[in-house]
Image: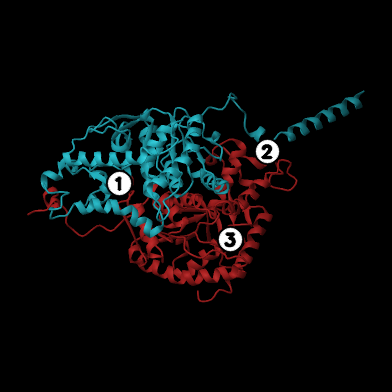
Chain colours: A red, B cyan
Amino acid sequence: MASVLQKLITPLSSGPLEPPRNKVTVVGVGQVGMACAVSVLLRELADELALVDVIEDRLKGEMMDLQHGSLFLKTPKIVSGTDYSVTANSRIVVVTAGVRQQEGESRLNLVQRNVNIFKHIIPQIVRYSPDCILIVVSNPVDVLTYVTWKLSGLPKHRVIGSGTNLDSARFRYLMAERLGIHPSSFNGWILGEHGDSSVPVWSGTNVAGVSLQKLNPDIGTDTDAENWRETHKKVVDSAYEVIRLKGYTNWAIGLSVADLTESLMKNLNRVHPVSTMVKGLYGISDEVYLSLPCVLNSAGVGSVVNMSLTSDEVSQLKKSADLLWHIQKDLKDL
Amino acid sequence: MLVSCWYLYLGAQRLYRHVLSMASVLQKLITPLFSGTLEPPRNKVTVVGVGQVGMACAVSILLRELADELALVDVVEDKLKGEMMDLQHGSLFLKTPKIVSGKDYSVTANSRVVVVTAGVRQQEGESRLNLVQRNVNIFKHIIPQIVRYSPNCILIVVSNPVDVLTYVTWKLSGLPKHRVIGSGTNLDSARFRYLMAERVGIHPSSFNGWILGEHGDSSVPVWSGANVAGVNLQKLNPDIGTDTDKENWKETHKKVVDSAYEVIRLKGYTNWAIGLSVADLTESLMKNLSRVHPVSTMVKGMYGIGDEVYLSLPCVLNSAGVGSVVNMTLTADEISQLKKSADMLWHIQKDLKDLER
């Protein structure tokens, strides 16, 4: 009375199941979380994917929908649960959970609400994956990356904020469009605080090593006849614009997170603008997270590239640092 | 004399510097070489409808790097523009250099493959016939415009009920039948292979199994064909798929039928799996692969079916569309199930109004 399985398959190695070697967890299965998950799956970066959220039905539905696509994927195990045990042994954990700003809500209140959520999430992640690297995506990302670092007890090189990675991607896309080339062929960095006061490093912009600032010394200033500064403004506005049009953004941030994940998983030592702990750099004396060009490898942030910034750019960074510290110092129970 | 020459020289130098500084960064940076007209796209894909399914198809196609141009069309302008912008902002990470959108179908011109995900979902208590007639009215607006701007395209219909709407699309488009495909049981088969493979402990791609016929509750699992590495499961267990089967393999097919409802109940809709499956079809069409997929095609004249209906059969897909159909060896029971589906579909279709162009 042997079953089909017994007749069909003869087991060879019957030891305990191998633990996953390239497991990725995504916390939060909203639009951003699922865009990250799908990008990671389609880039074939993980041998196991875990999804966590608090809404059980939605979580199970998303997991099933991804599993049903398994024929077309190379990630053989996709799991989910409200219990963090499903996340055990992750190499990378992407945190997209948290609340969005209600109308009229102060940043501080938003941050405190998210701190309370993260107080539940972060220790559980670290408990089940003590060697993981955390990528924080939830906004305001620089503050929440600091919060995550504090709550996790992990060394600073293993806690990264998605930071200005997306701003830089948008910048490179918009600049490249003006020049008629592919974004990957336009080199340009946006650093500092993710959001309205991000810093475009005009001195570094170049195509094939040709510095744009040498071609146009006014680039990025108010006196620039070609108004290149407008392009950075469009980067800052684009998030608001997309949210106004479709209610949220998800595809671009998902793709950018998969890009970071690839560098970490494959130990590539590629340089990305991500949010890292900058105390001691550029005269900043507070423990704040800001985006700088970071070398990412399987240990996390291997090192930081020392940008040659103008004194104006350095003062913008310092101002952001002060603003962020002003918000952080009042947070309770970290 | 010398003085005037000197001033002339100074003036010329200032003019030269002025002219040099007037050149834009673009002009200084880039020297055009070939300035002919822009090349038309060679591998353009259009997705009609930017709901959850449409966007899942779009993202899957982008991440599989199948298109050199992607066009999105919908009627809700804000959402359409927002989705286009969100994809464009990811351009750094993609190899599809042109992403466009618009309410006007001119943006879809010169597409090789057009994926149709537009249409309405069943309201509670709504009859299938009413749903179909409402979608016919929507398709009457969409399909002729698609064909007008991409007369050589291949249409993949995803909207439900897919078999009926693929028939409707074929009629409205005036295209030859091999260029109108319904996503059909492609997804059902993918789910079947996943669930069966899980029971056997292997990857879905290593489990061969086909679900054919009508997409939905009365799909036909071809148990006689189920195999791993050529080893026929029905030979190992002759009761497989029947009610007397102790191992209850039939339950797995039932789970396939139920899984769509289950996912909809849990998260409100399904999109990721259908998006991935559409990208898989698109790959075969774009790359002229002649791979065999279970998709909805015009089956009149096969298996004794006398009406013009669309049902899923194993189709060889290449750059012309459905190159050919594989003749399955079906049991008498399986054939009668197909015939029954065909009759039911024709019963719905014969009452549809205004399908001729």
Residue that extends furthest to the front in the rendered view of this protein:
B351
Residue linked to disc 2: A215
| Left or right: A181 in relation to A59 | right
| x, y percent for residue A43 | 40, 46
Q: Which mark is residue A49?
A: none
Looking at the image, can residue A43 be seen? no
How far apart marks 2 and 1 lie (CA) works out to: 58 Å
Name the residue rendered at 61%, 64% in the picture.
Answer: A321
Density class for disc 1 (Cα within 10 Å; few <14, some 14-19, many ≥20) is many
What is the secondary structure assignment of the residue under circle 2?
Answer: helix
What residue sits right under mark 3 in the picture? A281
A53 over B173 or under it: above or below: below
Q: Is residue A258 above or below residue B70?
A: below
Residue sitting at x 16%, y 56%: A14
Q: Please give the label number shown on residue B188.
A: 1
Q: Is residue B329 visible?
A: yes
Residue shown at the point (48%, 67%) measured from the top left: A149
Label 3 chain ID: A
